[in-house]
Image (tube, grey):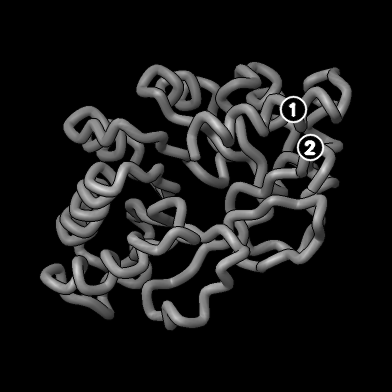
């Protein structure tokens, strides 16, 4: 890879395009032996998967994966008030994985739905010494400012293409605090970069260079 890559900080699809550096989200239920050693992964227990597991089994599910050199982040992990899983159990799983991130000195990729206050509290109580990336950001400017005060990075996805309110939020976020992603969408990350550069009023190469610097700082 000779030129500055497009970085897709959170995706569910591996991409062999040599211009794209992606972090592929993998489930703890997947076989570790199936990991591609040339691909970067994030691995964690998503709140949607908690009911399949026991709290005491977290170490067994995660430590092997997190020790793998291709696993460069813990995630996606987090809190979600729109699912039926007991919220206190969600907090236990989340906190346990945050502690693992501290132990392994890996960044975390965050899934958060209607749980921002609890997320900020847990962040304040658990200094991992690593970056926390709030993925799929599509919320208010005020919340963005609150998250930035707590040291979060914000990752923006497909919604940036069409959501004018989100575009206004994105315009006010410092370049050194952003990432871009495709998540589970069938979309080329280049389109999101193109729109992001347009919103910021900068050349796409300037955006690529800054996101690479953000990546190197976090990962």
Mark positioned earlier in the residue sequence (1 or 2):
2
The front one of 148 and 23 is 23
- Where residue 124 appears, as percent x and y from the top left, is 23, 28
Picture coordinates of residue 14 (x, y %)? Answer: 67, 67
Q: Position of residue 106 (x, y in %)?
A: 37, 45
Q: Is residue 50 above or below residue 140?
A: below
C-alpha distance separating marks 1 and 2: 7 Å
Q: CB atoms at circles 1 and 2 under 8 Å apart?
A: yes
Would you place residue 151 above or below residue 125 in this image?
above
The tag on residue 131 is none
Q: Quadrant of residue 169?
A: top right
Q: Which mark is residue 209?
A: 1
- Element marked by disc 1: helix
Q: Secondary structure at mark 2?
A: loop
Residue 215, image quadrant? top right
- Which residue is more in the foreground, 91 or 141? 91
Q: Residue at x 85, y 18 (%)?
A: 201
Q: Which mark is residue 4?
A: 2
Q: Across the whole image, how many numbered discs are drawn on residues?
A: 2
């Amino acid at each position: 890879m000779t030129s500055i890559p497009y970085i897709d900080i959170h995706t569910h699809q591996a991409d062999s395009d040599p211009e794209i550096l992606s972090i592929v989200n993998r489930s703890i239920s997947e076989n570790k032996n199936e990991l591609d050693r040339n691909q970067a992964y994030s691995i964690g227990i998503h709140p949607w998967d908690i009911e399949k597991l026991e709290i005491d089994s977290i170490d067994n599910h995660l430590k092997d994966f997190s020790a793998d050199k291709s696993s460069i982040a813990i995630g996606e992990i987090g809190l979600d008030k729109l699912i039926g899983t007991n919220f206190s159990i969600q907090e236990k799983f989340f906190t346990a994985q945050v502690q693992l991130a501290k132990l392994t000195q890996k960044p975390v990729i965050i899934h958060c739905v209607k749980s921002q206050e609890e997320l900020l509290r847990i962040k304040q109580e658990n200094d991992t010494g690593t970056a926390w990336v709030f993925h799929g950001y599509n919320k208010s400017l005020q919340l963005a400012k609150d998250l930035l005060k707590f040291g979060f990075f914000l990752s923006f996805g497909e919604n940036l293409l069409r959501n004018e309110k989100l575009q206004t939020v994105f315009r006010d976020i410092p370049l050194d605090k952003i990432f871009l992603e495709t998540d589970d969408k069938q979309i080329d990350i280049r389109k999101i970069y193109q729109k992001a550069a347009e919103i910021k009023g900068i050349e796409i190469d300037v955006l690529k260079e800054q996101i690479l610097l953000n990546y190197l700082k976090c990962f």
